[in-house]
Image: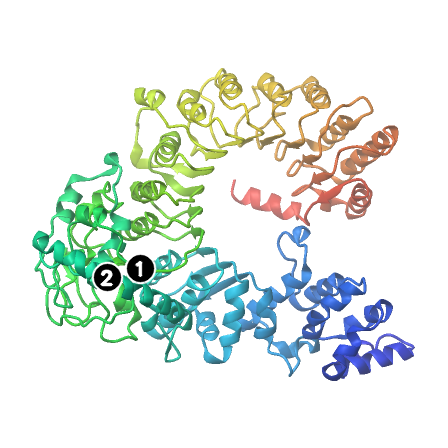
Amino acid sequence: SAPEAAMAAERPRSLFALSAAAVSRSMAALERDVWALPGHLLRGLLPLLTIFHLERAEDAARRAGVSTQPIWRKLWDDVMKTRPPNSESITCWRKKFLETFFSNVLHGVLDVSSDWRLNDRHFSPLLHSSPHVSQLTLCNMLQGAVELTAEHNHKVLENLASSLRILKFQHLLSCDQPIRRSLVLLLHRLIHHGSVSQVSMCSWPVPDTVLLVLILSMSAGFWRSGNTLAYHGSPCGLCREEDKAQSQESAQEGAERGCNAEQEGSGGGNQKGSPEETEARMNSVLSGPRSPPLRNPACEETSSEVPCDHTSTQGGSCPRSSSEQLSCPPVPRKTRRRLKPAVGRKRRCLRRSRGHYADPEDLYDFVFTVAREDNSGLLDKTRTTEGENTENWTSSFPGSPCTGHAGCKKRGGPAGIFSLKAAHRFRSVSTLELFSIPLNGETCRALSNLLSSWVSLENLVLSYNGLHANISCILSGLRALSRHPECRFRVLRVSDMFSHMPCMELVRCVLSALPQLHTLSVSFDLKNHLEGSRPEENPSCSEAEIPESCLEVLEIRFPREPLHTVFLLPVLKASKSLQQLSLDSATLPCPEELGLLLEVLKECTPNLKKLSFHDVNLAEHQKEVLLLLQDPGLQEITFSFCRLFESSTAEFLSEIINTVKRNSSLRSLKLPGNRLGNHRLIALADIFSEDSSSSLCQLDVSSNCIKPDGLLEFTKKLEGHIQQRGGQIPFTHLRLFQNWLDQDAETAQEALRRLKAVCSVVNDSWDSSQAFADYISVM
């Protein structure tokens, strides 16, 4: 058998080995007795079990004082045959293995018959590993979504609803209606009735607008009522349970709504407690007051005054105006009533519910009315059903968050913007990440509408989406969200190839709109070539008033823009709570600029703990570098690729070492990419000499042309200082990525072995010769 084959290489076969192999073959009958074995016997038996019994043995092994981590790590090496990223940070190899095992089996990458430890007829691979899956990636044509929503995997989906926290979509392609329906069922179960808190989408060069907005809207918690969201022919059971409680409340409130409608009957038509009124109230969440600077009169004119034919799908009247909606008393939503569509009738009132489509299987047409523009500007109505005119349904909503963008002036064309009035609100995620997915004006307006009421959202990451001027549309939605009393939004990260406006101007706009932000990251690769010779000196920049903010982390990556402290000053003055500042790829317009920045930081940011410079030329700013290293408030300083020693003398290195030795508050010093070389690395060991009062715990010397012999000398010198100090130094972590340690493997291994006895060392198997060849090839 397979367990016996695994032990065949061990000769001579002991009685214990024979017994263990026999027991492993009969685990189905002997499992309970095996868990009661003493630790020394259990330790020898565990490597002979399949992954399914090994997973079930965890509690018994813990009680017996036996760790299964080495076994799971060996399984990873034998089965996955790859080194996982950030392997040094993996704390539980059992979870890591079973999570990856689940994904590989789901996508058909791993054949369970390839290894006896993966195959057991008593267990389902997906079902048994699903409780350990906290992160799942769906790719391409969403075959994984189809498999997970299949009836035979119902229990797997239930397990994922409890365990899954992060759902990722990668390299998606357009899909047909049945696959989209499976995706809807999956998102409804995992997000609306599950535990998913983060949705990430990446690498989608030509996104399908329908599919993109579908995922975004369901992530925001919007979808139709549960009675029409059938799962294998039956309504969603969880929605049905909620219906019972809501129907009782609706019955109680029904009489009150009728009385109120009679009293207000002379106002604007019949005001009965209709589903349209209820849906209008829900939509009012998305059409609250907006910020005046971002409003577009042209957009408001085309969207706020819409004629109404006073005929609803239930024979009632048009709901009241937006101001009346905002002032009317709360009306409990009766979400599950089926509405008969008015076939062939134009619907010109933006605030009317579209109702449910006649075909309950048509999930796409229920929520979305996609209006695709042709060259003549006419709307493509091929996606609509029952011959209805959808022009007004794809226009901007009254008071839409996106009122400041030029694209809002068009009456038609926002493909993918959907009617939230016909939707029910479910649980939503707290983190949304969009990487390398182009977002045009239409999808930005749809996203803006969602953001304006997405109260559970805490983190938003927009990376390489080609936003350009559409960033104003996104900010408009976030501004509306920030005014919501239950808003929890705290982290915004925006990165792109081109900057639509100077970085500091964007930072000021964001902080003015979102004073409650805790973390803001703005990153651009290149300046927008259309920006031309825009003057840097803008009198309003230094005079702009920014409300006091809660900002704690600010990261700015400049597209080779000059760093003018006068523009940064209003931001720092408004950010008294700032603890971390990172400045990347900035140029210093004059020698005095860095000194001015240090003065401003000292004056305006008393709580600053971490300061980082990356790719900023500090070769001529030795005095300022030393001032930073002796700052008693900073605990972490990073000079990454700053050319520190390009034009320095040996005295400068000595001054750095002596300054750090005297600074007892500095905990982390990161110096990657500064061409330290062997001799400077060896000198840095004196930071930990006997006369040092340094509390430095972490040192990063990655990408510094360090060779094995230099690392060995550094290690020997460090060992000598440790011995002089009685074996105690605060140094705990050393990072050595991308150095020339492959040039003498034997010496490098000796140096690393001795270093690891002193501190934790993080390095990689970097091929310096290939890296040099790559460098030459792009010169």
Would you say the residues marked 2 and 1 are in contact, meaning their CB atoms lie under 8 Å apart?
yes
Q: Amino acid at mark 1?
A: Thr
Graded by Cα atoms within 10 Å as few (under 14), some (14 to 19) or many (20 or more), the crowding at tag 1 reads some
Residue drawn at 41 percent across, 73 percent down = 237
Relative depth, front residue between 680 and 544: 544
Note whether residue 414 is visible: yes
Q: Amino acid at mark 2?
A: Val
Secondary structure beneath label 2: loop
Q: Which residue is mark 1?
A: 209
Q: Position of residue 91 (x, y in %)?
A: 68, 54
Q: Position of residue 142 (x, y in %)?
A: 43, 68
Q: Position of residue 247 (x, y in %)?
A: 32, 67
Q: Taking 233 as reference, is 272 left or right?
A: left
Q: Taking 305 as reference, is 765 left or right?
A: right
Residue drawn at 43 percent across, 68 percent down = 186
Q: Which residue is mark 2?
A: 370
With respect to residue 704, does 81 lie above or below?
below
Relative depth, front residue between 313 and 188: 313
Relative depth, front residue between 762 and 41: 41
